[in-house]
Amino acid sequence: MNQLLTPVEAARELGIGLKTLNRARKAGELAYINIGFGTQREAPRFDRADLEAWMEKRRKTLCPSSSEKVTRRASTPTTSGYAVVDFAALRAQRRSEKQKR
């Protein structure tokens, strides 16, 4: 039977903090064995095989595979089909016209 590790020992083995270990445990990401019988507090212990499985599950590769499809943003034209309006001239034209009653 494998020797079970305490949370402090498991965190040290993984190279992470105790809070991070407990967060992973409570989120269901890291398997553990509860050796306690209390209803208020658990006494979690960790198997080395479970720690290794958790590390493998979290292993990442930074370089994306060239076989994966890369999504690109849709390009939009840099010019619009709208004309520039000279508001000052339009305002002067409307003022010069006769007002309707």
Image: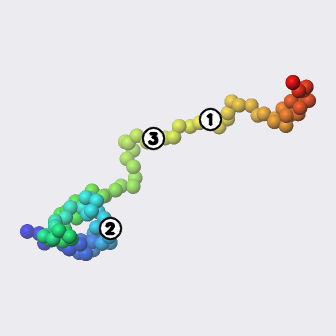
Whether residue 3 is situated above or below residue 99 in the rendered picture? below
The CA span between labels 1 and 2 is 47 Å
Viewer-closest of 95 and 43: 95
Q: Residues within 10 Å of mark 1 (few under 14, many from 20)?
A: few
Tell me the amino acid under the disc marked 3.
Thr
The amino acid marked with disc number 1 is Pro
| Residue occupying image coordinates x 39% and y 49% | 64
Label 3 belongs to which residue? 71
Q: Position of residue 83 (x, y in %)?
A: 74, 31
Q: Which of 40 and 53 is in front in this view?
A: 40
Left/right placement of residue 52 relative to residue 92 reads left
Q: In which quarter of the image is the N terminus?
A: bottom left
Q: Residues within 10 Å of mark 2 (few under 14, many from 20)?
A: few
Quarter of the rendering occupied by the C terminus: top right
Image quadrant assignment for residue 68: top left
Residue 55 visible here? no
* Quadrant of the rendered image containing residue 99: top right
Residue shown at 25% from the left, 75% from the top: 8
| Between marks 3 and 2 in the image, the one whose residue lies nearer the viewer | 2
Numbered badge on residue 77:
1
Residue at image position (78%, 33%) is 85
Asked whether the viewer can see residue 63, the reply is yes
The CA distance from mark 3 to mark 1 is: 19 Å
Q: Which of marks 3 and 2 is nearer the N terminus?
A: 2
Q: In this view, does 93 lie above or below 39?
A: above
Please tell me whether mark 1 sits on a helix, a strand or a loop.
loop
Q: Residues within 10 Å of mark 3 (few under 14, many from 20)?
A: few
**Contact (Cβ within 8 Å) of mark 3 with mark 2:** no
Asked if 83 appears above or below 26 in the picture, the reply is above
* Residue 72 position within the rendered picture, expressed as x and y whole percent measured from the top left: 49, 41
